[in-house]
Image (tube, rainbow, N blue to C red):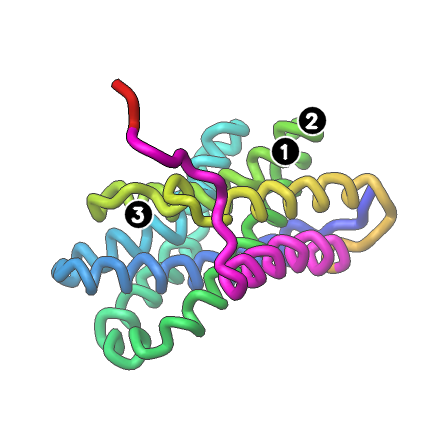
Amino acid sequence: MATTDPSTTQIVLDLAGIFVFAISGALVAVRKGLDVFGVLVLAGTTGLGGGFLRDVLIGATPPAALQDWRYLMVPVLAGVLAFVYHPAIGRMERSVTVLDAFGLGLFCVTGSLKALDYGLGVAPAALMGMVTGIGGGMLRDLLAGRVPAVFRGELYATPALAGSIVVVALSHTDLSYWTIALIGGGFCTTWRLVAIWRHWQAPVPTGPASV
């Protein structure tokens, strides 16, 4: 099995992913014209939602976000930064999108490995990695009154699942935690970035819908 140090490495990767996702959630709230409370709620939901769902589903309760103050402070900080500096951050839309892709890669790593630590099998652990990556964004879009991006043809969930599968497979080797994170998370992030660059879309129905 891979050599891991979840007490340190996993927390670092988790917090990095939370910050990136929280920024994206806060920007959605700003563009919807929400007040500062709404911005902080969407920042927290986007940053923490996926990990919260994962922890509840695998029985890691109370969730990490309710046990470690850093998990709550990071999205608050991201929300405040986005609320105050949203004109500048908004102009960096492409950079935020790139960071979001890196956040997706980070979460597919931490989600999968934490699920494995709690005794889940290969397939469930990979699914938990995907849920960790896409859960916060889905909750964000629902609260903002939008159809979740993962249902609108964007290649988002597929790279997350693929990266999670790579992570789970590599976890049965002697590779270090950081090496697994680099390979699995990098695979997910690269796929997501190439999909954005090449405008790849998941198949959607064509023609008029039948009733």
> The N terminus lies in which quarter of the figure?
top right
- Residue 99: percent from the left, percent from the top? 48, 67
Q: In this figure, which residue is indicated by the disc labeled 3?
A: 140
Disc 1 crowd rating (10 Å Cα; few below 14, some 14-19, many 20+) is many
- Upstream in the sequence, badge 3 or badge 1? 1
The local secondary structure at tag 2 comes to loop
Residue 136 at what x, y percent from top left?
A: 39, 46
Q: Residue furthest top?
A: 211
Classify mark 3: helix, strand or loop.
helix
Q: Amino acid at mark 1?
A: Ala
> Is mark 3 in CB contact (under 8 Å) with mark 2?
no
Q: Earlier in the sequence, mark 3 or mark 2?
A: 2
Residues at marks 3 and 1, CA–CA distance in whole angstroms: 23 Å
Count neighbours of disc 2 (C-alpha within 10 A) and say few if under 14, some if 14 to 19, many if 20 or more: few
- At horizontal 22% and vertical 70% (from top left) the residue drawn is 83
Query: Which quarter of the figure has residue 166?
Result: top right
- Whether residue 31 is visible: yes
Please say if the residues under marks 2 and 1 sit with CB atoms less than 8 Å apart.
Answer: yes
Answer with the quarter of the image where residue 82 lies: bottom left
Question: On residue 28, which mark appears?
Answer: none
| Above or below, comparing residue 189 to residue 119 in the picture | below
Quadrant including the C terminus: top left
> How far apart in space, not on screen, are marks 2 and 1 (Cα)?
6 Å
Q: Position of residue 6 (x, y in %)?
A: 65, 50
Which residue was labeled with disc 2?
121
Q: Main secondary structure of the magenta part?
A: helix
Residue 25, horizontal then vertical, whole percent: 32, 57
| Residue 66 seen from this side | no
Frontmost residue, 87 versus 57: 87
Q: What residue is pinned by disc 1?
A: 125
Q: What residue range appears in magenta? A: 179-208
Of residue 134 and residue 57, the one placed in the foreground of this image is 134
